[in-house]
Structure formats: structure tokens, C-alpha cells
């Protein structure tokens, strides 16, 4: 007698179970869940807002680079001067240059994120929370054009139960 787990187990008709193929059952089509998105007109208005913010950021970047150049040039002029600068002044100028470098980096990061937002507009995914999949509130997108999270998720660290992004303070309900 063969053990119950034998691979070539035969049935009463002499055929092998291992050679029987299951009858294919057609898979039920899952309803395609419509992903919410802003209309093309809305996306265009967001693009205008982002391009305005980018122009402002580029102007700020230009001014910061001029400031850095002025600090560098004034340092070079004082090196050639007969009177040396006091050590405290040198320290504050170095701190000012460091602060300007940090501001330049911050503005460059912001411009990069604005460019990423424009790519999301082109892909028609701008304004969709990457955590919840809901539409981010229009007010939030206008105030923070680089955001990828709904206010609901940002504040509470959870997706809203009703799927609607509401901008309200953490303690209010």
C-alpha cells in the first residue's frame, strides 16, 4: 500500500491525480477605482502659482549670491588694507557668509521641489496626497505649493475617515 502523500496516487479509473489539471476559473474583474485628481484648468492655475513662486525664489537666490559675492569681495579688500580687521569682525563676517550659504542651499532645495511639483502637474498627479490618495485641499496647495501630503495627514498622521482633506488646527474637531 502506498502512503497517502504519494505523488503518483491513482484513482479508481487508473488515472493519476498529478496529471489532472484544474479547470480554469475566470478571474472576476475588480472595479477600477477612480483616482481623484484636479481638473486640467485647476492644474493650470496651480502651475501659474508655482511658476510665480519659482520666479520669486530665483530672485531671492540671485540676491543671496550677490550678498555672498559682496562678503567675499569685502574680505579680499580688507586683506590688502594696511589696517587689519578686528578678530571679532572677522568672526561675524565668517558667520554671515555661513548663514548666506545655508540660505542659498535652502532656496535651491525649494526651487528643486517646485520643479518636482511641475512634473507632478504634467503627470496629472499634483495635489494627490501620497499617503492617503485623497485630494489635498486647494488652500493648502496655494499656500504650500510643494506639499505632497494632505493637511489631515500632516497634522494627525492619519488619513481622514471620510476622504476629505480639511485644514483645521490639531486640537479642534
Image (cartoon, rainbow, N blue to C red):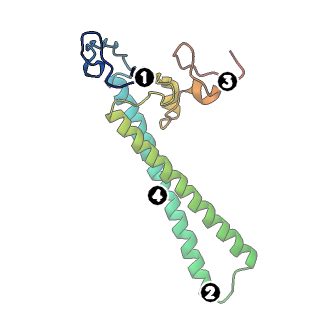
Q: Earlier in the sequence, mark 2 or mark 1?
A: 1
How far apart are labels 2 and 3 at the CA level? 57 Å
Q: Which mark is residue 169?
A: 3
- Tag in front: 1 or 3: 1
On screen, residue 115 above or below 130: below
On screen, residue 86 above or below 98: below
Task: Choose the circle earlier in sequence order: 1 or 4.
Answer: 1
Q: Are marks 4 and 3 in contact (CB under 8 Å)?
A: no
Which disc, if any, is residue 81? Answer: 2
Residue at 63% across / 28% down in the picture? 155
The number of numbered badges drawn on the structure is: 4
97 on left or right of 2: right
Q: Residues within 10 Å of mark 4 (few under 14, many from 20)?
A: few
Question: Distance between the Cα atoms at labels 2 and 1?
Answer: 100 Å
* Residue at image mark 1: 3
Q: Could you tell me how far apart the alpha carbons at marks 1 and 4 are, in whole angstroms?
A: 82 Å
- Residue nearer the viewer, 78 or 49: 49
Residue with the mark numbered 4? 62
Quadrant where the C terminus is found in the figure: top right
Q: Secondary structure at mark 4?
A: helix
Gap in Å between the C-alphas at discs 2 and 4? 29 Å
The answer to whether mark 1 and mark 4 are in CB contact below 8 A is: no
Q: CA distance from mark 4 to mark 3?
A: 36 Å
Name the residue rendered at 40%, 31% in the picture: 126
Q: Quadrant of residue 156?
A: top right
Residue located 56% across and 80% down the image: 76
Q: Which callout, 2 or 3, points to the residue nearer the camera?
A: 3
Amino acid at each position: 500500500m502506498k502512503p497517502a502523500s504519494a505523488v503518483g496516487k491513482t484513482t479508481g479509473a487508473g488515472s493519476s491525480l498529478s496529471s489532472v489539471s484544474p479547470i480554469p476559473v475566470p478571474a472576476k474583474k475588480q472595479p477600477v477605482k477612480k483616482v481623484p485628481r484636479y481638473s486640467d484648468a485647476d492644474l493650470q492655475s496651480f502651475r501659474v502659482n508655482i511658476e510665480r513662486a519659482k520666479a520669486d525664489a530665483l530672485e531671492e537666490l540671485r540676491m543671496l549670491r550677490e550678498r555672498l559675492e559682496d562678503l567675499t569681495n569685502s574680505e579680499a579688500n580688507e586683506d590688502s588694507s594696511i589696517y587689519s580687521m578686528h578678530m571679532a569682525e572677522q568672526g561675524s563676517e565668517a558667520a554671515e557668509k555661513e548663514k548666506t550659504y545655508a540660505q542659498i542651499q535652502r532656496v535651491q532645495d525649494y526651487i528643486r521641489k517646485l520643479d518636482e511639483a511641475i512634473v507632478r502637474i504634467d503627470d496629472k498627479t499634483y495635489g494627490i496626497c501620497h499617503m492617503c490618495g485623497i485630494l489635498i485641499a486647494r488652500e493648502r496647495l496655494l499656500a504650500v505649493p510643494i506639499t505632497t501630503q494632505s493637511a489631515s495627514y500632516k497634522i494627525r498622521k492619519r488619513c481622514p475617515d471620510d476622504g476629505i482633506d480639511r485644514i483645521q488646527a490639531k486640537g479642534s474637531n
